[in-house]
Image: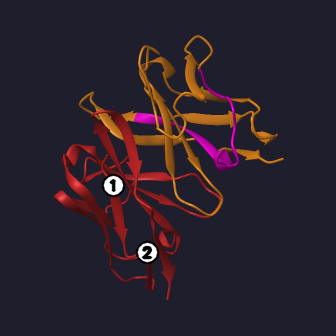
Chain colours: A orange, B red
Amino acid sequence: QGQLVESGGGVVRPGRSLRLSCAAAEFSFSGYSMHWVRQPPGKGLEWVAVVWNDGADKYYADSVKGRFTISRDNSKNTLYLQMNNLRADDTAVYYCAREGITSTGFYSYAMDVWGPGTTVTVSS
Amino acid sequence: EIVLTQSPGTMSLSPGERATLSCRASQGVATRFLAWYRQSPGQPPRLLIYATSYRASGIPDRFSGSGSGTDFSLTISSLEPEDFAVYFCQHYGNSPHSYTFGQGTKLEIK
């Protein structure tokens, strides 16, 4: 089915940087698009970014465009999120998630495997 | 950008009852781009339904999805204790590529 585990969260001051990692296991990582989704405390889900399976295409939410960079290393089965110029409203639990593939081989446009999340707190 | 509005914000029901949750899009969307998730406290979301009506792997048949155009719904035929959680709908848009979540519906025990 697949497993994902995020790491790299912590407390950081506004304007600083942080890099999150997501280790994938038990599935063919290089065959899937991968996402970052975040959830501020007590609030709903916000999609952050997606990277295609080969890393060639990346797309971002407007709220993070120009500050965050999604990347992947398929040789290490790892997804990354480089977060620069962090702001207080970036405080959230950050999840990595896999975009599913249907039984007929098409993208499902939905996220079928999620990690437990890593917490990022931006505070002075 | 498409906005998803879920209703009601909170729903109070008893175990064994039927629940119907609504997700309305600000403009018409393709059925293959609409999904539903359940999130229990302290847990990541779990995919329930993709492409409006297809159950994800391991999801019991008490969950069903339907809809088209701007109006979509998730129905739980008979509520189990683990179903009392928050539910999110989600849409994929391809111009530009983006993913949007509704604000959520909390299903609580009456």
**Residue A88 appears in the rendering:** yes
Q: Tell me the residue at 76%/40% (across/down).
A: A14
Q: What's the CA distance linking mark 2 and mark 1?
A: 16 Å
Instruction: Name the mark on residue B88.
Output: none
Q: Residues within 10 Å of mark 2 (few under 14, many from 20)?
A: some
- Give the mark nearest the N terminus, 2 or 1: 1
**Residue A115 appears in the rendering:** no
Q: Residues within 10 Å of mark 1 (few under 14, many from 20)?
A: some
Q: Is residue B6 above or below residue A17?
A: below
The residue furthest right is: A124
In this view, the residue in front, A57 or A65, is A65
Residue wearing tag 2: B9
Q: Chain of mark 1?
A: B
Q: Amino acid at mark 2?
A: Gly
Tag 2 and tag 1 share a subunit = yes
Is A47 left or right of B69, judged from the image as shown? right
Q: Tell me the residue at 57%/24% (across/down).
A: A69
Local SS, label 2: loop
Q: Is residue A95 above or below residue B94?
A: below
Q: Chain of mark 2?
A: B
Asked which quadrant contains residue B8, the reply is bottom left
Please state the horizontal and vertical placement of residue A115, each as a whole percent of the image. Answer: 60, 41
Instruction: Name the mark on residue B3.
Output: 1
Give the label, 2 or 1, closer to the camera: 1
Q: Amino acid at mark 1?
A: Val
Q: Which residues are magenta?
A: A78-99
Q: Is residue A12 above or below residue B8?
A: above
The residue furthest left is: B69
Please state the horizontal and vertical placement of residue B88, each as a whole percent of the image. Answer: 42, 59
